[in-house]
Image (tube, grey):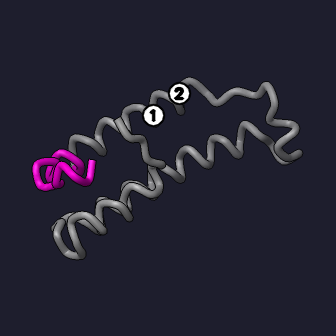
């Protein structure tokens, strides 16, 4: 199984499916941005204002981990499932 960075997957989907192929394309991209913002915000909070050295040994909150997991599931069900049959096998 190939793995892709989450932030890059919307660009890959646009290349494979073509512009305008998804009626929910803008909402899909916005949902990627929402999930990334949640993750980045929590990582920044864990790092604190002292920089990356201060982040060593710090942890993200369990509540945010659960929120991120739920966001990934919801995203897959609400967006990705709409077009999974339209992606050519050569793109996987």
Q: Residue at x 16, y 54 (%)?
A: 88
Secondary structure type for disc 2: helix
Q: Residue at x 85, y 46 (%)?
A: 51
Of residue 56 and residue 84, the one placed in the foreground of this image is 84
23 with respect to 57 (left or right): left
17 with respect to 36 (left or right): left
80 with respect to 58 (left or right): left
Q: Could you tell me which quadrant the N terminus lies in? A: top left
Residue 5 x %, y %: 48, 49
Q: Quadrant of residue 18?
A: bottom left
Of residue 1 and residue 9, the one placed in the foreground of this image is 1
Main secondary structure along the magenta-highlighted residues: helix
Q: Which mark is residue 63?
A: 2
7 with respect to 91 (left or right): right
Query: In the image, is residue 19 above or below residue 27?
Result: below
Residue 72 x %, y %: 37, 39
Residue 19 x %, y %: 24, 75
Secondary structure type for disc 1: helix
Q: Rounded to the nearest whole Å, what is the CA distance between mark 1 and mark 2?
A: 6 Å
Q: Which mark is residue 83?
A: none
Q: Residue at x 15, y 53 (%)?
A: 83
**Residue beneath disc 1:** 67
Contact, CB < 8 Å: mark 1 with mark 2?
A: yes
Q: Which residues are the magenta region?
A: 79-92
Of residue 15 and residue 57, the one placed in the foreground of this image is 15
């Amino acid at each position: 199984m190939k793995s892709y960075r989450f932030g890059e997957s919307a660009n890959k989907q646009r290349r494979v499916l073509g512009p305008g192929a998804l009626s929910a394309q803008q909402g899909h991209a916005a949902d990627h941005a929402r999930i990334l913002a949640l993750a980045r915000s929590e990582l920044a909070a864990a790092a604190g204002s002292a920089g990356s050295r201060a982040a060593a040994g710090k942890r993200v909150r369990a509540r945010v981990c659960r929120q991120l997991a739920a966001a990934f599931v919801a995203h897959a069900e609400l967006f990705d499932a709409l077009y999974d049959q339209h992606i050519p096998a050569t793109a996987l």
